[in-house]
Amino acid sequence: MKKHNFSAGPSILPQEVLLKASESIMDYNNSGLSLIEISHRSKDFVDIMEKARALAIELLGLEGKGYKALFLQGGASNQFLMVAMNLLEKRAGYLNTGAWSTKAIKEAKMLDDIYEVASSANANFNYIPKGFDIPSDYDYFHCTSNNTIFGTQMKSFPKTDIPMVCDMSSDIFSRTIDYSQFDILYAGAQKNMGPAGTTLVVVKEDILGKVSRKIPSIMDYKKHIAAGSMFNTPPVFAVYTSMLTLEWLKGKGGIAGIEEENEKKASLMYSEIDLNPLFTGFAAKEDRSNMNATFNLTNENLKETFDTMLKEAGISAVNGHRSVGGYRASMYNALPLDSVKALVEVMSELESKA
């Protein structure tokens, strides 16, 4: 039976990418060697790294604008501290929209003064705060573009004269926006880009080198840039698979092409949630995420029946996070529209049975 993979992360990847990546494990580029047993300093892998970095910049529309792409280790969680290490001199402002921004704030507070410019914690993060002020004397402003747990997404970003940093772990490469409005953006690969193990960091070079603290070498963006994103041994397989995924995305018309598909998936999903009386959405309608649709049953007595129907239809990983409950359909770039149709059909069938 075909599986419909709605995992929130690590998540679904294109089948053609998985096939090519798996072949590289046994024999990369007809070399007689596995990708994961060759030197990261070899021409084969240096070419992979350079192509992955170039594709990221190209697809984001940042060519010739002073940005460098890095593929680092430690996950997006490592960036919570790394951003502060490189940019925080006195104080910074954070928008708190969920679990990951809460963790980012906690890590940055280890270094200096961090202020929440706004928060939606009062409503269990079911909306995105708006109309807040960002003081001009802050070192930077940090936000999280999409919240996987709560199913909210920033549809626009504030205008500010200070550097803006964005955690885009769960919606990077999914929609057309002006990525040059950010001075740093980062994203764990395991949602829209590749397997767990690497994190894409895109940095505007001219904002670096302005803090007075000594930065540990492994935490210093400038050192990683100077070393071509190979200051230490990189996660070769994760970088290679990310490169393949970015090639796949370019072949689909880039971000504009995939955005059109993502809009269709989200529209179908939310239409069923709104029209089917057995379901109710968690996130505020104007802030609903195109990547993660969170919803609940209006009658919990139907849970066992619904879960059985999902399993029989081959629908996997739609349980909601424990802090929200209910269900979550993660619709990342590689998820086919047919998988969303299959889920909607089960939801509609439940209504006919109730």
Image (tube, rainbow, N blue to C red):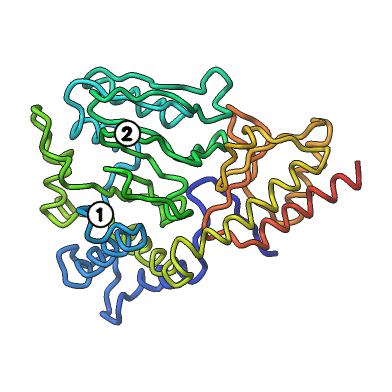
Q: Nearer the viewer, residue 251 or 334?
A: 251
**Residue toward you, 308 or 64:** 64
Q: Amino acid at mark 1?
A: Ala
Taking 3 as reference, is 30 above or below it?
below
x, y percent for residue 80: 31, 33
Q: Secondary structure at mark 1?
A: strand
Element assignment for label 2: loop
Report the side of 115 relative to 305 (left or right): left
Residue at 19% from the left image edge and 66% from the top image edge = 46
Q: Nearer the viewer, mark 1 or mark 2?
A: 2
Residue at the spot of label 2: 160
Q: Identify the mark at residue 139; answer none if there is no mark.
A: none
Q: Amino acid at mark 2?
A: Thr
Q: Quadrant of the N terminus?
A: bottom right
Picture residue at 67% right of the left edge, 56% below the top:
340
Residue at image location 48% in from the left, 54% down from the top: 175
Where is residue 325 drawn, in percent x and y? 65, 30
Residue with the most extreme right position? 353
The residue indicated by pointer 1 is: 69
